[in-house]
Amino acid sequence: MKFNLKTKLAAAALASAALAAPVIAQDDASTLPGQMDVSRITAGTYTADSLHTLVGFRVNHFGFNDYFGIFGGVEGTLQIDPSNLSAASVDVTIPVADVTVAAEGLKDHLLRAGGDGGEPDFFGPSPAPARFQSTSVALTGETTANIAGNLTLNGVTRPVVVAARFTGAGANPMNSKLTVGFEGTTTIQRSNFGIDTFVPMVSDQVELDITAAFEKQ
């Protein structure tokens, strides 16, 4: 096939136009089912989407670097009314035994029994789920709040405050359930919960990073 000068110029013009055309974002947020719009939240009882609710933890290791892990399989309920957000409440359990870390050997270390009948280094082989029960919600902005509550971990209950942020609401396209999402952060001292192995070589301070989805019932 032969191309004359006119054809070559037309092809060059098309190529130039294609290069100059704006790139269309493939993840346009405006098309997503969930939107950060408080008016999309409807009052009622919601249950945790266990497949998409996670609690990450972060500790410093020997002063060299930070180490991460994740607790999944979270279960629980959220009571919320957009006309009275300060009256919202949440009650969730976190299965400690389902901890996920980068190395299987470290998971075994977190969950193994104590040597020679002694106390385990961390949680032991059959740890009870952790539980967070809110006691109050104080709004700090249009989409943010401090959620105070009691955290029970390793058989010990202590007050904590979670800095929470609303991240989206809408209908889940997979099951049509109305869903709301939140993120939250808090910091605990693990020694307050009877988990003081290797402190301060492994930091007493543990940063928790929470991402949660709740589906309306």
Image: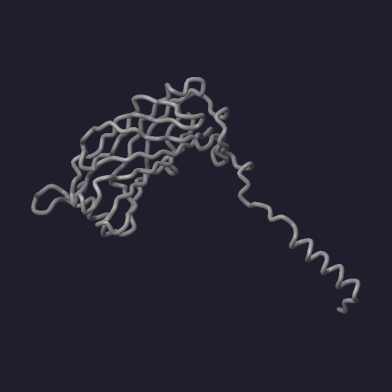
As drawn, 195 above or below 162: below
Q: Nearer the viewer, residue 105 or 198?
A: 198
Residue sitting at x 29%, y 53% = 60
Please tell me in which quadrant of the rendered image residue 201 appears.
bottom left
Report the coloring of the rendering.
one colour
Residue 207 spot, x, y in % from top left: 33, 44
Residue sitting at x 40%, y 35% = 163
Residue sitting at x 88%, y 71% = 7
Please tell me in which quadrant of the rendered image residue 160 appears.
top left
Quadrant of the frame with the N terminus: bottom right
As drawn, 60 above or below 92: below
As drawn, 111 above or below 136: below
Residue 99 spot, x, y in % from top left: 31, 49
Residue 115 spot, x, y in % from top left: 11, 54
Q: Count of labels shown? A: 0
User: Horizontal placement of 97 versus 136: left or right?
Assistant: left
Residue farthest toward the left in the current orientation of the protein: 116
